[in-house]
Amino acid sequence: MFSEECGTDDPYAAIVDSLLDNTTENIASLRDAISQNDEQAVRRISKSFRGYDTLIPKRDAINKRKPQILKILLSEDDTVDESLMAAACESRQRDVISALVEHGWPINRPLSLNMSPLWSVQVTSQRSS
């Protein structure tokens, strides 16, 4: 724990411990709500996350094929990164790709050196036909 590393004389150590414990509990609760497709719980719990802390739950929603849950998470915080778009492209979830673009992923930003995300989805869709 943070307080053990900093020593018990640090007045902020207990606050940091409390925040870290709360975050760990909330992330576990949020991941459970995503697995159970509990939209109300996702809305309520996700309000306590911002920025890069939201990426793991969003990736969970993509990997579990829960686009509606992803849209709820994006409405609370629109942070997106390459890992989210890569997961969406790999699983060929067009509605997820659209949601990521709507929430800030630059449509012309390449996911790899020679393909844009939407082009890579088109190519993999044609190969699997």
Image (cartoon, rainbow, N blue to C red):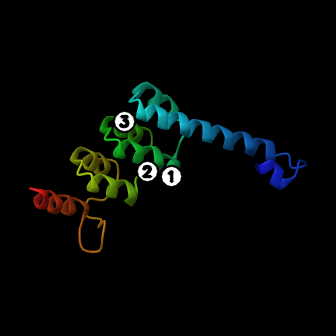
Residue furthest toward the front?
128
Q: Crowding near pointer 3: few (<14 within 10 Å), some, many (20+)?
A: many
Q: Are marks 2 and 3 in contact (CB under 8 Å)?
A: no
In the rendered structure, the answer to whether residue 29 lies left or right of residue 101 reads right
Mark 2 or 3 closer to N-term?
A: 3
**Residue shown at the point (23%, 51%) measured from the top left:** 92
In the rendered structure, the answer to whether residue 19 lies left or right of residue 81 reads right
How many numbered tags mark residues here? 3
Query: How far apart are the two marked residues, 1 and 2, measured between alpha carbons?
Result: 7 Å
Mark 1 or 3 closer to N-term?
A: 1
Instruction: Please give the residue where the numbered disc 1 appears in the rendered image.
Output: 52
In the rendered structure, the answer to whether residue 90 lies left or right of residue 60 reads left
Tell me residue 12's x, y (percent).
80, 46
Nearer the camera: disc 1 or disc 3: 3
- Mark sitting on residue 69: 3
Q: Crowding near pointer 1: few (<14 within 10 Å), some, many (20+)?
A: few
**Residue shown at the point (43%, 25%) measured from the top left:** 40
Query: How far apart are the two marked residues, 1 and 3, measured between alpha carbons?
Result: 17 Å
Q: Amino acid at mark 2?
A: Thr
Residue furthest toward the bottom?
113
Q: Are marks 1 and 2 in contact (CB under 8 Å)?
A: yes
Instruction: Please give the residue where the numbered disc 2 appears in the rendered image.
Output: 79
